[in-house]
Structure formats: C-alpha cells, structure tokens
Amino acid sequence: MKNWDLSTSLKNLSPTKRLKSFTISKLVQKILAYALIIYLFVFIILNATDSLNYSLILEKKSALLYALLTTLMISLVTLIISMIGGFFFYLAMKSNNTFLRTFTLSLREIIMGTPLLVMIFLVVYVFGIAIGVSNKLNLGILALSAYMIPYVANAYEGASSVIDRDQYIVMDLYHFTLYQRYRYVILPQMIKPLIPAMLNNLSSIIKGSALLKIVSISEISYVITVISNKNYASIEGYLIMWIMYLIITIPLSLVATYLGKRYMK
Amino acid sequence: MNIDIKNLSVFYDQNEVIKDISLSINDVKVIGIIGESGCGKSTLLRHLSGIEVASGGTIYVNGREINRDNLREYQSRIGVVFQHHSLFPHLSVRENIELILTKIKKMDKTEAVDLTNKLLDDFHLREQGDKIPSKISGGQAQRASIVRAIATNPELLFLDEPTAALDPLLTEEVLNTILELKRKGSEFIFITHEMDFLKKTADYFIFMNEGIVIESGNIERLENPKTELLKKFVNR
C-alpha cells in the first residue's frame, strides 16, 4: 500500500505549484489569525456586562471630540518637546564631559525605572508647587516629556549606529565642527531609522497621556471617566476609551511598521 | 617628503604594537609600507597621518613635529584614504567632494563645482558624479574617495591599503588611479600587499614584522633583500 502524506505530495509538485500552495497556506493562516483577534474583541465587548448601554456616553459627542483633540494636542506637543530635549539628552549621553555623561546616564536609568504615574505625580505636585506653576495641562505635558526624553534619546542613539566608524574618522580628519557633523553627515542619515521609532514613541505618549486623568486634565481618559461615572456606565466607558485609543494607535503602528520595512531595504 | 621617526612605541592595552621604531627618510616622493597582516603597518600609518598620536616617541614630517598642539594644522595639509571607501553614504560622489571644499575648506561654491568637475573628469568618474556610493562599484567608490582626499590639494596623501576590500578586477582600476597620482607628481605613503605594484609605484619601502622595521630603503633594494624575512616575503 502506498504511504501517502502531505509533505510527500508537496514535494511532488512543480516549483510554481508549490509556491502557489505555500502562498494560499499563508493567506489562510493570516485570515484565521485575524478572525481569532476579531472573535476575542467581540467576546470581550459582549461579555463586559449583561446590559451594555453605550448611548449614555456616545451622546456626549462634543465632549468626546474635545477630549480626543486634547489628547492629540498633548501628545504632539510632548513629542516635539521630547524630540528636541531627547536630542540634547543624547548629545550629553555621548559627551566627552564626564559630568554631563554621568548625570544623563544616571538620570536615564532613574527615569526609565520610574512608573509614569509617579512621574506625573512628582512633576505636578512636587516640582510644580516648588517652582510655583499651577497650570496642570502644562505640568502634565512637562511630566510626559520628561518621561519620554530618555526613550527618545535612546532612539537617537540607535539611529546613530547606522554611521560607521570611518565616517567619524573622516569628520575628525577634516575637523568638522559639532554643528557641521550633525547638519551635514549624522542627522541626514539618522532621519530614516528615526521616523518609525518616533511614531512608536508617539503611540507610547498617546497611551501614556491616559494617566493624566489623575491630575484632572480633560483628555480622553478623564472625560470618559467623568461621563461614565455620572451615568453609572464605567465598563462601557472603558470599552469606548479602549476603542478610541486603538483608532489612533493602530494606524500609527502600521505606518511605523511600513516605514521601518521600507527603510530597512 | 622627509620623515623622521624617533623611538616610536605604540601600546594597545598591554600589547606593544609598534616597538621603538626609529627611521629617517629624506627626499622621497612615494613610500610603500609592506609586511604580513598584523605587523603594525596600519598603526604606523595612523600615527604618521595623526589619526592617532603616540605617547612614546616623536614623528617629524617635513621638519614639523606631529603632536596634539599642531594636529589640526597638520591634518589640514594631508589627505587619507582608508581600506573601505568611507564616502558619506547619503551624499552623491559630487556632494561628498563639494561638502569638504565648501563647508570645511570654505571654498567658493562656483570654484568648488568647477574643481569637482575637473577632478571627476581627470579620474574618469564624471558619469558616477551624481550617484550615491551604494549605486556605484566598490572600485569606483574607492577612486572617488581618493579624489575627495586630493581635492583639497594635500601636500601628502596616506593610503591605508585601499584595495584590501576589493576583488582583483576592481583592484586594478584603483591601482591605476594611484599610479596616475604618481604621474601627476603627488607625494604619498601607502600600504600594499601587491609587490609588483609597490615596485612600480614606490621610491622607498618600509618592511615591517611584529611591530619592528626589519628593512627599509630605496625600492631597488627589494631586488637584493638583506634579511631572510624580507627575502621570504618578496618570494611568497
């Protein structure tokens, strides 16, 4: 009796047919994976409570839109501040000056080991009071920026690794100034690998901004919490909050992945 | 050129890579440094070009000592070519040359463009001028880096085995470019493994082994080596 199995039958196919069969198999696997994700999503939505009532929250459209715009504004401003601050932090991390290097590297370890919630508390209620600033929105952005700066500095450090040692020797030989090094050689080469990293950082900032609700800033998380608490619909509130964040972060993540793949070529 | 090296010693960690070298070379135009891999050739070249400054010993090039105080001035008068082309990869060949001329040497833009065009023509790289290094062959890229190094009209050029990373076919075109430099009267010091090329190009050779200069002298002396080590090296 002939001993038949799938691998033997695939081996017997022509290369073109084998490739076609392989492509179909991959496609089926992808469809199954997406189906499982959708199933889990629907499962969570349907099993959250017995009687879900989203209308109580969704009817506050203008408040939700304002919260969405506030979150985006906070995130973009934080990204800009942390990109500028992160660049100087990165320069200090790489500096030949021992004080600067030790200070920034130690600070990086401390900040990266600090929960964002604690950072927001420290900046708003300790630092803010100490310097006499009470605007919580500004302090919230400052807290998020301070938290993100070491991560952004790490992204600069990773991006700078695309520049090989010989290029630095050539710049040394011709005595490029610090400005000339970054303006003409280093930054133009860092931009490509930096774009996906910065989009991922933006995604982290958007998610992190949800914690600003502890200082009553009217971003998505705070506004939804207020509305849902008033209507006794906290579960629905969290589900809507979840979807709102996903609507922003998933496209960002997809763009980052696409750009990452494109620039890796 | 005149080179005067006195008691040069170089340590990397605890390893003595250059061992108390003293050498005096006068009135030569082209010096070739030879020796097995790891004998200290590149280290010597890096010290002669001021990429590294030794803590032990002194080096005089054309009567002036190379030290940390005058390094900037010295390096403004030399050019260096590495084993790999070391062009800035995001800039075209033309931009690589013009960047050095306009931003670093503060040359007028029109003058820099004219000089770049002339150099690209002289070294048969005009067609590659607007391409970035990854879009041209390794030999063309190395030739372009030689052109960039001579664009500033250095009084002395250093070439650290510029064909090391190239296959034999591409090696030929780079060697021809270096020969072209000799014909144009440039003064340079180079490292090579190609004995025929060394004999054709250099006026003077330095043969090193394990951080020591075993033999050095006018290129004709290679026909009758005094030491067994050089004899073996030449007849490999």
Image (spheres, coloured by chain):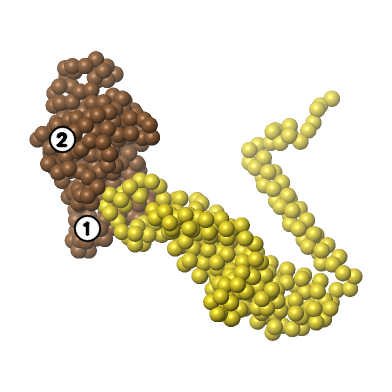
Residues packed near mark 1 inside 10 Å, few (<14), some (14 to 19) or many (20 plus): some
Q: Tag 2, which secondary structure? A: strand
Does residue A167 show up? Answer: yes
Q: Is residue A174 above or below residue B53?
A: below
Question: Label for residue B105?
Answer: 1
In the image, the chain rendered in brown is B
Q: Which residue is mark 2?
A: B4
Relative image position of residue B61 (x, y in whole percent): 16, 40
Task: Using the rendered view, name the quadrant where residue B213 is placed.
Answer: top left
In the image, the chain rendered in yellow is A
| Chain to which the residue tagged by mark 1 belongs | B
> Quick check: B186 left or right of A181?
left
Relative image position of residue B43 (x, y in whole percent): 30, 35
Relative image position of residue B140 (x, y in whole percent): 31, 44
| Residue at (68% x, 67% y) in the render | A246
Between A144 and A123, the one lying in front of the other is: A123
- Of labels 2 and 1, the one closer to you: 2
Residue type of the residue flagged with mark 1: Lys
Q: Tag 1, which secondary structure? A: loop
Between A226 and A167, the one lying in front of the other is: A226
Q: CA distance from mark 2 to mark 1?
A: 29 Å
